[in-house]
Amino acid sequence: DYDALHLGVFEDWERLVPGTEVEDLAAAAVVAEPTAEHLAACKPTVEYEGISRGFLKLTKLQDESIDVVHRKESQYERIMRSGEYQKQLLIANAWCAAFIWRKTKDAPIAVTQDVFRQISEDPSSVPGTVIQEIYRLADQYHFFHWHLAFPDVFHVPEGSKKVENEHTGLSGGFDVVLGNPPWERIKLQEKEWFASRRPDIANATNAAVRRKMISSLSTEDPGLYHAFLQDRRKAEGESHILRNSGRFPLCGRGDINTYTVFAENKRMMLNQTGRVGCIVPSGIATDDTTKLFFQDLMNSKSLVSLFDFENKKGLFPGVHRSYKFCLLTLTGRKRPSSSGAEFVFFAH
C-alpha cells in the first residue's frame, strides 16, 4: 500500500505478534512517536514518480522489431537494478517487516519510526543486520508490493490532480482483475498440521490433551517442536499484519480466511471503471467477518452480480458437495451498477 508508506511506521506496543519480549521495548517506544519531520522524510513520491514514468515510457515503445524488444528488456532490467528502485523496495519491505519483527534481546533492532526514517533518507546509515533481517522476512513472508511490481499501472497523479484511488494512494489501476483465490484460514490448525507428522497428536481426545502433547515435544522431538513453533508464528505474523496494518479495513477481522482479503485487495487494485471477476465462497455475502465489505459493495453500487452455486456436482473435488461458492463481479467506483446487482442462488 503506497499510501501507507507516507505515514511511516506507527508502533502499537499493545498489539504485538507472539515472540515479542515486552521489557525490551521500553527504549524503542521512546522514539516511536512520529514527528512532522519524520513523516515528510518518509514520503517516497519523487523517486517513485521517476520509476513510474520510466516504466510508462517502456510500455509506449512498439514491439515492431527484435531490436526494440531487446532495448525494452535492457531498459527494464536497468530500472529494476537502479538505486532508486532498490531503495523503494527496501522501504516497502521495511514497512511490512515492522509488523512481524521478532522483538527479542537477540534480534536486530526493530524497525521503529526512527529506523524507517533512516532507511528513507539514507539506507547506508542503517546497520547491516537490520537490512539483512528485512530481506529475510521479505523472503519468508513473500512480501509483494503492487506499486513496485506494476509502476506503469499505478502512478503518481500529475501536478495538482487528485489521487484517483484512495486505497492505494495512487492513480490508475487495472482494467480487469480475475481470479480464484485460495480458500484457507490464516490461523494454524493444530489437528491439520500434525495429521501427517504425528497422527497421535492430531487425534488427541481434546484440545487440552493435544496442547500437553505438543508441549512435551520440546524434549521428545525438539526438531518437530521447533518446526511447529516456526509455522505457528508465521501464521500469527500473517494474521497480525492483515489485522493491524490498516491494509484491509473491511475484511482484516475475526477468524480471517484468505479469500476475504484477496477479494478486498482485488477491488483495491481496480481503476475507476474496471471490473473484478472472482470465484469465492458465498460467505463473502453472508459471513459476519465480511459484512462490512459486502455492505460497502452495496452502498457504493460496486456489486454487479453474485451467482451462488452449491458444489452438488463436485466441480471442486476436494470440497464438500454441500459447500457453497459464488461468481462475484464488481465494478470500479466511477462505473456504478446503477440498475442494481443481479443475484442467483442455489445454482448447480
Image: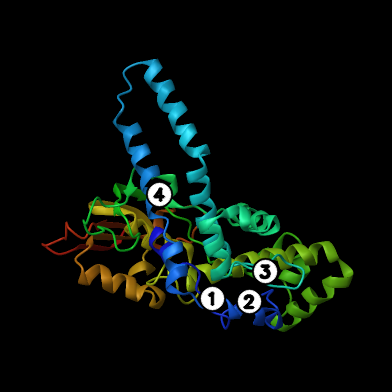
Helix, strand or loop at disc 4?
helix
Q: Amino acid at mark 4?
A: Tyr
Badge 2: few (under 14), some or many (20 or more) residues near its Cα, within 10 Å? some
Q: Quadrant of the N terminus?
A: bottom left
Badge 1: few (under 14), some or many (20 or more) residues near its Cα, within 10 Å? some
The disc label shown at residue 102, or none: 3
The residue where tag 1 is placed is: 11
Q: Amino acid at mark 3?
A: Arg
Callout in the foreground (2, 3):
2
The disc label shown at residue 28, or none: 2
Helix, strand or loop at disc 2?
helix
Gap in Å between the C-alphas at discs 4 and 3? Answer: 29 Å
Q: Earlier in the sequence, mark 4 or mark 3?
A: 4
Callout in the foreground (4, 1):
4
- Relative to residue 97, is residue 275 drawn left or right? left
Residue 268 in sight from this viewpoint: yes
